Amino acid sequence: MKWVIILTFTIIYLLITFFGLGPVLLADGSIQERVITLAVVLLLYVIITIIYRSLLKKIK
């Protein structure tokens, strides 16, 4: 069960990184648009990490 959670969250992290940080680094938009996108991506990382840690604690 633990490996399924780890694999699932690894895929989620990769998708957030690819689709979230890509527009931040490569977008043609304004700096304000990039900063807002970066803030949303960082917030998603925090939320996903909290969920991941809580699920791993429940398994132990």
Image (spheres, helix red, strand yellow):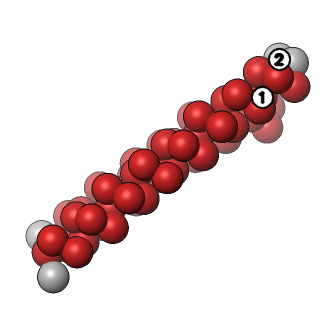
Crowd class of label 2 (few under 14; some 14 to 19; many from 20; radius 10 Å): few
Q: Quadrant of residue 4?
A: bottom left
* Residue 34: mark in rendering: 1
The disc, 2 or 1, on the residue closer to the chain's N-terminal end is: 2
Q: Is residue 21 left or right of residue 6?
A: right
Seen in the picture, residue 17 relative to 23 is either above or below; the reply is: below
Seen in the picture, residue 5 relative to 42 is either above or below; the reply is: below
Q: Quadrant of residue 7?
A: bottom left
Under tag 2, what secondary structure? loop
**Mark 2 vs 1: CB contact within 8 A:** yes
**Measured from the top left, where is residue 12 in percent x and y?**
40, 48
Under tag 1, what secondary structure? helix
Q: Residue at x 14, y 75 (%)?
A: 59
- Residue type of the residue flagged with mark 2: Gly
**Measured from the top left, where is residue 18 in percent x and y?**
58, 42
Quarter holding the C terminus? bottom left
Q: Is residue 51 left or right of residue 49?
A: left
Crowd class of label 1 (few under 14; some 14 to 19; many from 20; radius 10 Å): some
Instruction: Single out the residue that lies furthest toward the bottom.
Output: 60
Is residue 54 visible in this depiction of the protein?
A: yes
* Residue 29: mark in rendering: 2
Q: Residue at x 69, y 37 (%)?
A: 38
Q: Nearer the viewer, residue 32 or 28?
A: 32
Instruction: Single out the residue that lies furthest toward the top.
Output: 29
* Residue 5: mark in rendering: none
Quarter holding the N terminus? bottom left
Q: Residue at x 32, y 56 (%)?
A: 51
Q: Quadrant of residue 52?
A: bottom left
**Measured from the top left, where is residue 49 in percent x and y?**
42, 59
Disc 2 to disc 1, C-alpha distance: 7 Å
Q: Residue at x 66, y 37 (%)?
A: 39
- Residue type of the residue flagged with mark 1: Arg
